[in-house]
């Protein structure tokens, strides 16, 4: 799977670890920055991951900021992105299986590197269920997105 990974400065160290480990797991990883620990703004990185998804260059994305919340809020403003903050195993795979989540948001100041890697792996291994109730709900989400001004 091709994964776009990005972080602001707060998530820089965690991003570096995830980029390395996910590539070692066999994923094609697109590192969209930040490339230093100098302060950056998470909306810029969310926009980069969203663009990679919308263009088809990436299948899924991982965004990291201090809490995961800001990156998630920004990412969900991008058409076609369904992002979720996940700091537990169930949400990381269930978000894909039931909600067709395509961006995992992590808080580098909230969870440690070992858990973050586990969550990223669960997220990337999960597949959307295609059950009618989940399809119906995702269609309703897409309808909300379609009718925004």
Image: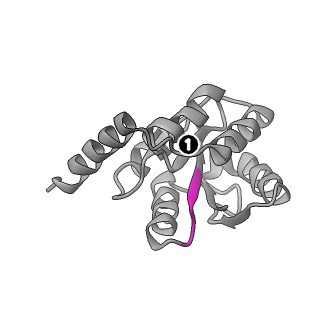
Magenta range: 57-62
118 displayed left or right of 144: right
Residue 88 appears in view: no
Viewer-nearest residue: 144 or 78: 144
The quadrant where residue 140 appears:
top left
- Which residue in the protein does label 1 denote? 105
Query: Is disc 1 placed on a helix, strand or loop?
Result: strand
117 displayed left or right of 107: right
Rendered residue at 41%/54% (across/down): 81
Callout 1: 10 Å neighbours few (<14), some, many (20+)?
many
Please tell me whether residue 61 belongs to the stretch shown in magenta: yes
Q: Looking at the figure, which quarter contains the C terminus?
A: bottom left
Q: Is residue 118 above or below residue 16?
A: above
Please tell me whether residue 127 belongs to the stretch shown in magenta: no
Q: How many marks?
A: 1
Residue 93 appears in view: yes
Q: Is residue 112 above or below residue 45?
A: above
Rendered residue at 17%/53% (across/down): 148
* Residue 3: percent from left, percent from top: 64, 60
39 displayed left or right of 121: left
Q: Is residue 22 above or below residue 65?
A: below
């Amino acid at each position: 799977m091709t994964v776009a990974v990005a972080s602001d400065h707060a998530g820089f160290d965690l991003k570096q670890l995830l980029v390395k480990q996910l590539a070692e797991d066999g994923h094609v990883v697109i590192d969209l920055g930040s490339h230093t620990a100098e302060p950056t703004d998470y909306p810029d990185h969310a926009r980069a991951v969203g663009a990679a998804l919308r263009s088809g260059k990436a299948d899924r994305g991982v965004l990291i900021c201090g809490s995961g919340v800001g990156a998630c809020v920004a990412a969900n403003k991008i058409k076609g992105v369904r992002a979720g903050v996940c700091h537990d195993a169930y949400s990381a795979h269930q978000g894909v299986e039931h909600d067709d989540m395509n961006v995992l948001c992590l808080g580098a100041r909230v969870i440690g590197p070992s858990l973050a890697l586990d969550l990223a792996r669960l997220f990337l291994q999960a597949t959307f269920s295609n059950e009618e109730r989940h399809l119906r709900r995702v269609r309703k989400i897409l309808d909300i997105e379609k009718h925004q001004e």
